[in-house]
Structure formats: C-alpha cells, structure tokens
Image (cartoon, helix red, strand yellow):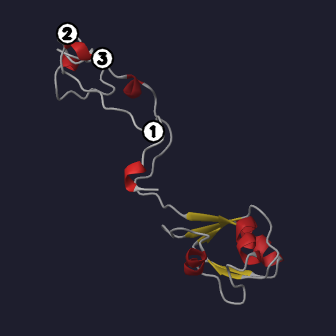
Amino acid sequence: MKLNQLADNPGATKKAKRVGRGPGSGMGKMGGRGIKGQKSRSGVAIGGFEGGQMPLYMRLPKRGFNMRNPKHHAVINLGILQKFIDAKKIDIKKDITEDVLVESGLVRRKLDGVRLLAKGELTSKINLTVTGASKSAVIAVEKAGGSVTLPA
C-alpha cells in the first residue's frame, strides 16, 4: 500500500455545505435562512426562548436534588475481579489496593476512589483495600475467607 492509494471508505466523509455561493448552488443569496427576522441575522442563540412567554422548561415543576460536586467512583464487580484473578492479572498473595487494580487494567482511572459491588461470585481469598463497598459485597468477600478494608 502506498500513501497516494489511501482513501476514506465511500460515504465516510461528506462535503461541507457552501452557503451563499450563488443561485446555482441552491443555497445562494440568503443561504437557507429565509427572509428577515431574528433567525436570519447572525449572532442569534435562542435555545428554549419562547418570545417572552415563560419557556416550557421553566413552567414545569422541578423535583429532587442535584448535588453541585458529586463524587464519581470507579465501580468494580466481584465477578470481574474473580475473572482477573483467574487470568493471573491480579496476584492474590499480596494486598489488592486501588493502584493494583489500575495496573492490572481492571480500572482505568481511580476518579474519587474505587467502589466494590456484589455482582457476580468471588471464590478467591483476597485482602482488598478500596474507598467504598456495598454491604453485600463485603459479606461475599468475607464468606470467601478474605477481608475488605475501607477508609475510616
């Protein structure tokens, strides 16, 4: 293969619409904006604006609570953890920390910490240190003979 033979797949790229380039283009003169009015002019961004009427998104009732700075945890399940142990990507003789989980590729990024959930089965005896864990996940690890250490 040569550099001059490289080409995109058919349909992968699309030519840009050239607006205001004469009547033959079908997008000449007013460039598909119609005649007059606010939307025909430049610098207009009116998402959700209803011409002075109270917009729909403001009329509808709001419920619940949105946290301003929520914590985002990387989530791991027991079943996937066991799969990585079976594949010898995680050594169970040593303590399993969040850094070990990142090195093994089980977790891409720690974010605000790693949280253990109880989906799947764990058969290996492990000592795990994570930021958070569900009660059922802790019970499952202890049932397998291991322990889960959480920060105080």
Q: Nearer the viewer, residue 138 or 99?
A: 99
Q: Nearer the viewer, residue 3 or 27?
A: 3
Q: Residue at x 55, y 80 (%)?
A: 99
Q: Residue at x 74, y 75 (%)?
A: 87
Labelled pair 1, 3 in contact (Cβ < 8 Å):
no
Crowding near the residue tagged with mark 1, few <14, some 14–19, many ≥20 C-alpha atoms within 10 Å = few
Amino acid at circle 1 = Ala
Query: Residue 54 lies in what quarter of the image?
Result: top left
Report if residue 33 is visible in the image. no
Instruction: Identify the mark at residue 148; answer none if there is no mark.
Output: none
Mark with earlier residue (1, 3): 1
The image shows residue 52, relative to residue 93, as above or below, that is: above
- The kind of secondary structure element at disc 3 is loop
Residue 65: image x %, image y %? 48, 45
Mark with earlier residue (2, 3): 2
Q: Nearer the viewer, residue 20 or 108?
A: 20
135 horizontally vs 18: left or right: right
Tell me the CA gap for discs 1 and 2.
34 Å
Crowding near the residue tagged with mark 3, few <14, some 14–19, many ≥20 C-alpha atoms within 10 Å = few
Q: Residue at x 48, y 67 (%)?
A: 111
The residue identified by callout 2 is: 35
Amino acid at circle 2 = Ile
The residue identified by callout 1 is: 12
Query: Residue 40 lies in what quarter of the image?
Result: top left
Residue 27: image x %, image y %? 25, 17
Instruction: State which mark lies toward you, 2 or 3.
Output: 2
Instruction: Identify the mark at residue 53; answer none if there is no mark.
Output: 3
36 horizontally vs 116: left or right: left
